[in-house]
Every structure is written in structure tokens, then in C-alpha cells.
Image (spheres, grey):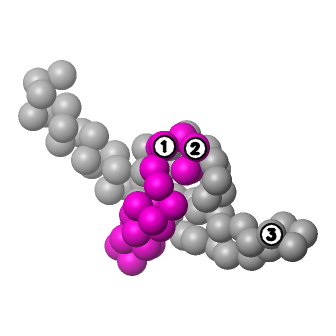
Amino acid sequence: MSILMTVEEADFVYLKEQTQSTVGNLSVQITKLQEAGYIEVEKGFQGKRPRTTCRVTPVGRSAFEEYVSTLRQYLNI
């Protein structure tokens, strides 16, 4: 999810390239993040090709910021 924090939205291909994930692994992670309410997923087409676009929700941004804060406290940074 950290990659999504740096952009307004990202499509599946970009996320796959940036994370070096397999299609299957990335699909599962996107589904889990969507079910948790951390990201919004929009499915559509660009021309004749399917396109999946993801963006972080306010709930997801807050959860990620809390995670980073907790991690910093744990590591004494």
C-alpha cells in the first residue's frame, strides 16, 4: 500500500511492476485491502483492454499513517 500513498491512483500494471508481484498475489492483496476499506478499486476498459485502478481511501491513509507511527515507536526512531 505504500506505493499507493505516493500517487493519487495507480493501475494494476503499474502496481505489479513496482511491487514485482505476480498477478495472483497482487490480485489477492488488492481484494484484501478493498475489503478492509483501505483502497477503492475501479474496473473498466481502456480501449478494448481491461483496466483496474486503485486509490487509497481516507480510512486507508489513516491506517497506514498509524502503522508507520507504531513501527517508528517500536524501532525507537
Coordinates of residue 31 in the picture (x, y in percent): 43, 73
Q: Secondary structure at mark 1?
A: loop
* Dot 1 amino acid type: Gln
Residue beneath disc 3? 49
Q: In the rendered structure, which disc, 3 or 2, sits on the residue that comes first in sequence? A: 2
Q: Is residue 48 left or right of residue 43?
A: right
The residue lying at 51 percent from left, 61 percent from top is 23
Residue beneath disc 1? 20
The residue lying at 18 percent from left, 38 percent from top is 71
Q: Secondary structure at mark 3?
A: strand
Q: Is residue 6 magenta?
A: no
Q: Quadrant of the C terminus?
A: top left
What range is drawn magenta here?
15-37
* Dot 3 amino acid type: Arg
Alpha carbons under labels 2 and 1: distance apart = 5 Å
- Graded by Cα atoms within 10 Å as few (under 14), some (14 to 19) or many (20 or more), the crowding at tag 1 reads few
- Graded by Cα atoms within 10 Å as few (under 14), some (14 to 19) or many (20 or more), the crowding at tag 2 reads few
* Dot 2 amino acid type: Glu
Coordinates of residue 45 in the picture (x, y in percent): 80, 73
- The answer to whether residue 7 is above or below residue 45 is above
Q: Is residue 24 magenta?
A: yes
